[in-house]
Every structure is written in C-alpha cells, then in structure tokens.
Image (spheres, helix red, strand yellow):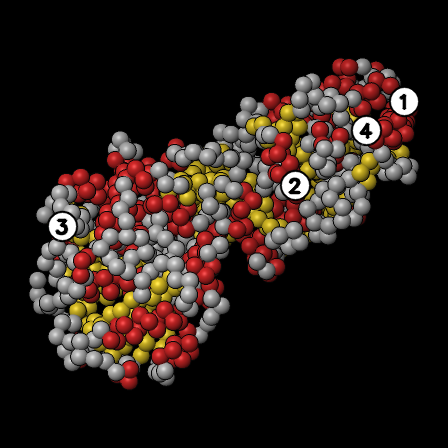
Amino acid sequence: MKKLKPLAAIVGAGRTKFGELWYQNPEALLTEAGLKAMESVEYGLRRKDIQACYFGSFLYQVTNKLALIPGYMSRELGMNIPMSNTEAACGSGGSALYNACLGIRSGEYDVTLVGGFEKMTDRAGKIIDDLMFAGDPHEFDAGYTFAGLYASMMARYIHDYGDSSDGRCREALALVACKNHHHAVGNEYAQFRREFTVEEVLNSPLVADPIRMLHCSPVSDGAVALVVVSPEVAKEYTDTPIYIVGSQQATDDVSICSRESLTGIKATRLAMEKVLKETSMTMCDIHLAEVHDCFTIEEIFFLEDSGFCERGEGWKTVYDSYESFKGSKHIPYVNGNSELVVNAGGGLKADGHPVGATGVRQVYECFKQLRNEAGGNQVDKELNVALCHNIGGTGGIATVHILMREL
Amino acid sequence: MSEPITRRKILVDYRIRAAKCENCGRVYFPPKSFCDIEGRGSRMREVDHFYEKGTLLSCNVIRGPTKKFDYLKSFLSGIIHFQGDNLKVPGRITDYVPPPEEVDVTEFIDRGVVPRFRKTFTDGTSGLIYYSSMNFSFEDDYYPFQQYLPIKPSVNEKSSKPGIVGYGVYLPKFRIKNEGHGVLGVVERTLPFADEDTTTFAVEAGKRALIHSAIDSRYVKKCFVGSESAPYAVNPSMSTVSQVLELGEPYEDGFFSGGIDSQFACKAATDLFIDAAALVAYSTFGGEYVMVIGADNSQAAAGDPLDYTVGAGAAAFIFGKRNVIATLDCYVPYTSDTPDFYRREGEEYPKHGGRFTGIPAYFKHVGTAMKAAMKACNLTPKDIQYVANHSPNGKFPYQAAIEAGFDKEQIEPGLVVKYIGNLYSGSCPTALAAVLDIAKPGDKILMTSYGSGAGSDAYIFTVTDAIEQKRERSITVKEQIENPHRQYVDYSTYRRWKEG
C-alpha cells in the first residue's frame, strides 16, 4: 500500500454513556462529551484553539423543542466561533465529520470540534412516529415504521437469498445481534452489556415480522465529540494522532420503493467505491469496521455493499464465521483470507443508537481501538486501519471514513 | 397534517399518480417535473394506477404502529410493483388481520394486489379524515381485480328513454352472524373493516358502476351520494367520490361536475333516481350521465334491536339515455311527517319508535307507493317479475310485498337483507341490483324505498336487451354474499370497526 496523504487527524475524543439519560438536557450531554474530548488531548487543548464546530443531530427540534443549536452550543462552550448543525437522520454524525473534513481540507480551519448528539427518550411514546420523518411521507402513510421498512428489506433478502437455507439465513440475522451484544460486554459506555443467545433473539417480541425486538438497535440518549485537526498541526496535540485518510459520501432516493434494489444500499456501495478508490485500498486492508447496524440486516447489507462478500453471501459469512469462532473476545467475520472485526464496541445494536451521535461514536470507537486505548474491550489483534460506515434513514445517505494509525 | 398539504396529497394519493417521461419511459413517484436521464429536455406526462393491479415486492407485519395507525393495531405494509410502468410504491394491505404469531411474510411476495380507496388515518374525532388509494387487497382474496375499459359511444347510438346505464354494489368482506335462525329474518350482516366508512363504500360502488357501464367517467356530470352516516357533518362525500373517480370533464385539478350529499333516512339515494333520469333528458343539463349512490355504515347503538339488523355497504347507479339496461317507466313518491326514526345533530346513534316504525310508518308508505305505481302504469303484480323493497329486516319487505299481491318468487331475489343486513340508504338500491343481476330483457321491476320521517318512492323499471352485454362486467350481489373469502368477526370486533 502506498503511503497515504491524510485529510485530517483526530487528536481527542470523548463520549457519554448511552442509554436512558433522564436527568440531562441534550446540550449538556454534548458539552460533557466535548469537554471530555478536549481534556483527552495529550498535550492539552485550549478552547480558544478551536476555530469551528460541526454538530450532527436529527430530532432535537422535535424531541426537545430546540432549534439554533449553534446558539445553544455557543452558550454552553462560551465561544463565538462558526458552528453548524448537520441533519441527515441517523447519518447526521457521519455527515458532520464529513463537513469538518471539508473545512480542514479547504485550509480554512486547523482545529475543529465535531459533536453528535440525540435525546430520544424525552419523546419515548412518540419516537416511533418522529423517526419516520426520515422516511418518505408515502411510506409513513402506508403505515410503515422504520423497523417495518427494514423488515420489508429483510423479508425480500430472505426470499431472494435465504429461502433454501434451512433457516440458517434467519439464524445469521440473529447472530449479528448476538455478536454485537457479545462485543458490548466489555464496553463501559454501552447501553446493553449482556449476552443474548440466538434463541433469545428469535423468541423476542415481534416488532415488524420478520424483525423482532432483538434485531433492532435501541432508543437511546447520548453524545460523542472528537477534536479533529489538520494533519499539519496534529503532532502539536499528540504523538499518536489517528489520521483520516478517506472521507466520502453518497446519497440516494429517500424512499426504499424508488431504489434499484431492496436487498442492498446503493449509497453505501457508491460511498465505499469512492473511499476505497480514494485510499487505493480493498476491503482486505481494513482491520476493523464500525458498521451502521440499526437492524441486523443492515450489517449484512454492508458486508455485501462494501464488497467484503458477494451479493447474497453475507448471511453465509456471518453464519460460518460465528460457527467456526473458537475464542472468547471479538468475533471476526472471515471470508477467504480476509478477516474483519465489525462493531467492536457493540455497534448501534448494543452500544446504543442516539441517532445523531452514532456516526461520531463509530469514529470514537475506532480512535480508541487504533490507539490501543479501548481497555477491557480492546480487540485482540494488531489494528492499523479502521472504517466507519454511517447511513441515514433507510439509505438516503451514506458516509464512510477510513482511519489509520500509521500511514 | 394541514389542509393545504392534504389537498396536495389528494392529487397524488387518490389515483396513485406518477410522472412518466415520454422520451425514455421512466416513471417517477411521487411525480416530478423532469426525468433523471433526459434532464431539462424531458417531456413528462401524468399517469395513474387507480384501475391497475400490482404485485407485492415485499412486506412486513407492523406490530407497533405509529400513532396514526394505532387504530389498526397490527397490519401488513408492503412495496407494490406496477409492472406496466415499472413503478414501485409503498402501500398498506387492507382487509387482512395478522395472527398474533409470526407470519412468514416471504409467502406474500409476488402475490397480486388491487388498489383500494380507504381511510389512512384521522386527525382525532374533529380533524380531517385522510383517504388514499394506496391501500391494497390481495387479488386472490375477497376483492377481485376488474379492468376499467370505457367504450367510446358510437355516433349512431340512439338516444332512448332515460334509465339505468350500469350499476355497482360494494359489500365489505367482513361479516357478523346473528345467532340461531337470525333476528327478524337477518342471518348475517356486513360490516366495515376498520379503515372503511361510508365514503369509501361509495367510491368502491361507484368504481364498479363505471366498470359495469363501461362509460367514460368524464361524461358523468352530476353525482349524488345519499347516506345517513356521512363521515363529515359538513364536507361532502360526493366531492371525494368525484375526485377519486374523476367524474366530469377535467379542468386544472378539478372537474366540471356537480352534485350533493343527500339525507332522507334510508331513501336519501332512491329519491334522486328520478332527478338523475330527468337531468339526462334535460337539454340544458349538458351532461350524459348522472351517478346516484346509496351508501351507509348503518348506525345502531350497542344493544339496540337495530344492532342485530344493521349492515354496511353501498350501491351506485348510473343514469343516462343511451345503452340503458333498464328504462325508468314510472315514479310515485309518497310523503308524510311521521317521526318514526331520527337522529338529532351531534348524536351518535338514531332513536326509533319501536313498533310504531311498522304499520303507521313503513307499511303505510311502502304499501301506498307500491299500489299507486302499479295503478299509474295500469299493471298488476302478475305483470311484474320482481319486487325490490327497502329492507330494514327480513320480514317487513316480504310482508309489504305479499300485502301488495306479490308472491314469494317475485320477492325472494331482492330479499338480500337476510345475508347483508340493512344497508340503510344502500338497502333498496342493493335489492334492485340483486334483481337486475338475474333479470332478463323485458322484465319489469317494482322498486319501493322507504325513508323514515317519512316517505317512499316507488319506481317501475323495464329491463332492456343491453343488460346481457354488460353482465360479464358485474360482480353480482349473490357472488359477494357467497364469496368464500368473506370473514366472520366477533361482536366486540364488529362494534370496534363499525365505530371507526
């Protein structure tokens, strides 16, 4: 692999626990994560060093009746610098980082703060409706929920690729949940730190047949922040920056009905093609991937959309990898000579899914893993390249970032 | 949702309207002004899929719905593919209640589905009611797919005496049984699914009437919807029916047609048969056809004797003066201020005078009108093949006809109330349709309605040769009554769905 020219570097990261955080306002969560990120910078970071803030959030206007996040965050952080909030549904956090990279690449900024947050439990009874803002209104009026949309994609996937699998395809869709919950046990910030068996997943309450409760990521509160700087100044803040070497985004029709396929995400495929081209990498070069597993089928879609598996083969990789795994820590997906650890912190499924925070949390996890700072949850192998895959809605937007420790 | 948003959605959702690029054939839903491929050089035209059938690409069972669909508890939502235009749209599967255990939804994939005009949701009890045709039922279930193929009128086609050009009856899939041998001769009754109401019944019946008549809807210049259970106190069902069925010459996003909702208890529709026939014969009217629909989700308070006889459904008749299947030969109305059954504004259910609704009300008016009509035409019961009376139960219409001199063979074919219940404004029209389903050219039919408050309209029709050529396009009342896919529900479900 040729030496890559980094686009940006991450020098600090902080997050809150994910879960039902009843006692905190969303802006306070973001402040907590932001301060932790700043305090984590090895050689220190003064607030006045930060030149711009990029936030990602989806529903705060609905859940908390807030708007003008820059104004709130100006008050919280006591700064008057440029700030913007990106809304791209579940892809808001990844989009905020993408925008920050553009700001740095343009030469305008050297030091930025990137934050993602969401406060979903404040609208516990109505959040199912609220999430449908990221769907097409006709999907909403057809009675669809977000779980329902993914359930229709999952049903078609089972029909097309798993019908003759003697139930192994359906089992693989449950194993994704088992794996991610297994990975979350060692993650001190995760919302659910317990194991689930396949039987428990397949006997959990029905949400949208064929999707059951344990195929779904949870409703969560939380915030995550990163200090993202230009590569040129990175070493002023730490000896071990994590470099962003690829940052790409692609979009597609908001409605699953208008897409080319129900059994894959075109935006993911396009963004992945671009980022692999940008970095001259293949999926074999990636050691760790934080994947957008809002529902377990989406993790399998990623394996296929990214090229890690052939179309329709993702469930087999999951099934076989799980069956052949002998260790006790992270369960990698194995396809031929390629080995990929996916969602080392538990993913959206078990770590939690405060929608706007998720894309930033994925980068936080990779940052910690690449720096060997994940503590009890550290992946038990040498890691140098990690990928973050964050999508919005049912695939209306996909943002991918590739991170490296050593260039 | 706001009123302006609703209006914009109506234009798309009622007809499943999409935009098609005339250069490359790509179709876009919701409609857009240019083609992705052809760009600014696109030539886009609107296409609709209201009369088409689709297939289910995928689906799922929603178990925890959004607030606006709480009333359905659990249901199927899916993606529907219209093969002709290669168009995919989201839709809800209606007339289907998933079992509590997991459904293998992959078994539904590739099944044919038919668009249905249904309620999607309501803004509480005082806000708007949202309707859409993006609800679908399985083609191989209760509601069959029928093509709508209007036949261009021949320039040589002669104008005749006004009468019925075509008709359509819609009876919902769901039924409730009366215990034992029935109540007042009613053995089982139709009821609405949770997403149906009087307006959706009217649309379905009107759609079938257009298919049966094979006339172009743009020539229907007036539409009357008679009902005593209209979903809105103010805001006509008729304008919804016209918008969905595109009645009248289109202009911008409206139509050059008119009409009203009418109310006269159970004769709200039949009273207007004569007006419809008169209009098509009136040169200043300037239209070819008038549609009259009787539709009701018949109301009854829980436990009231009516609660064991009420049904739900609609019948639509199109009147014209070309290619009629039955000429309207005689009309005799009879009216008096007899308060036997009434509902005050704002009240949910009607009240009635018990036994007073019999001899002084129903029998007096129906009997008088029947006899007067026969006298006016100089006919005796022997000259008439069938009787179709308003049917509040199975006994009244039978007894009234016997008293007028008719025998069982003339009465039974129209006595469908036994299996569908009292459809209120749709009752007498449905009985007429059941008779027309089997009538032969030359047969005479005496139809007599009754509306509480009170009045009767007696009509005599003579069936023409044209009835035979249209027969294959009808779904008969008997077929609907005996449909093997009809589904029975218990009393609590019946009350819940009926109250909407």
Q: Are marks 1 and 2 in contact (CB under 8 Å)?
A: no
On residue A339, the disc is 3
Question: Are dots 4 and 1 on a single chain?
Answer: yes
Question: Are dots 3 and 4 on a single chain?
Answer: no
Residue B156 seen: no
- CA separation in Å, label 1 and label 3: 95 Å
- CA separation in Å, label 3 and label 4: 81 Å
Horizontal side of A378 relative to A127 (left or right) equals left
Question: Are dots 1 and 3 on a single chain?
Answer: no
> Of the residues tagged 3 and 4, which is closer to the observer?
3
- As displayed, is residue B402 above or below residue A7? above
Tell me the residue that label 4 is attached to: B448
Amino acid type at mark 3: Glu
Mark 3 crowd level (few <14, some 14–19, many ≥20, 10 Å Cα): some
> Of the residues tagged 4 and 1, which is closer to the observer?
4
- The residue marked by circle 4 belongs to what chain? B
